[in-house]
Image: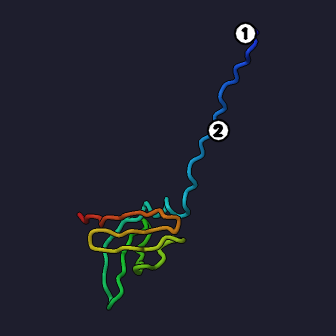
Amino acid sequence: MSIHSIEIKPAIQAPQSKPAAIPHEADLRRWRYLGITRMGAVEHAFFHTGKSTRMVVKEGLALGEWRLTQAEKELAILTHPKGKSITFKPTQSE
């Protein structure tokens, strides 16, 4: 057997696929957190969407399946059922 008779096949690389984007994630990343207010026992967070201001009740749906899971003076967290979350810090007014 000759070394020249051995066929060397190059390794086949499987195309790397990006993880599927969660719906509305890109839109939510453009939102700005404005702060919270309490009306009775219910907390509401305010966000600027780039076009308007949106009020979201704590534990309520913000956009699609994204839910406001935490709202405080210093931050707000939106969470998706697939386990991803986005943390917002309040924007500073000039």
Residue with the mark numbered 1: 4
Label 2: few (<14), some (14–19) or many (≥20) C-alpha neighbours in 10 Å: few
Residue 16 shown left or right of residue 7 in the figure? left
User: What is the residue that sits farthest to the left in this orientation?
Assistant: 94
Q: Secondary structure at mark 2?
A: loop
Q: Nearer the viewer, residue 21 or 12?
A: 12
Q: Separation of disc 1 and disc 2 at Cα?
A: 28 Å
Label 1: few (<14), some (14–19) or many (≥20) C-alpha neighbours in 10 Å: few
Q: Nearer the viewer, residue 83 or 64?
A: 83
Residue 10, quarter of the rendered image: top right
Q: Nearer the viewer, residue 52 or 68?
A: 68
In the image, is residue 56 above or below residue 33?
below
Residue 38, position in %: x, y? 31, 85
Foreground mark, 1 or 2?
1
Q: Quadrant of the C terminus?
A: bottom left
Which dot marks residue 31?
none
In the image, is residue 39 above or below residue 8?
below
Report the amino acid beneath label 1.
His
Q: Residue, x 41% and y 65% (percent of image)? A: 31
Residue 48, quarter of the rendered image: bottom left
Report the amino acid beneath label 2.
Ala
Residue 74, position in %: x, y? 27, 69
Residue 52, position in %: x, y? 43, 72
Which dot marks residue 14?
2
Q: Residue, x 70% and y 10% (percent of image)? A: 3
Residues under numbered marks 1 and 2 in contact, where contact means CB atoms less than 8 Å apart: no
Q: Residue, x 32% and y 71% (percent of image)? A: 34
Q: Secondary structure at mark 1?
A: helix
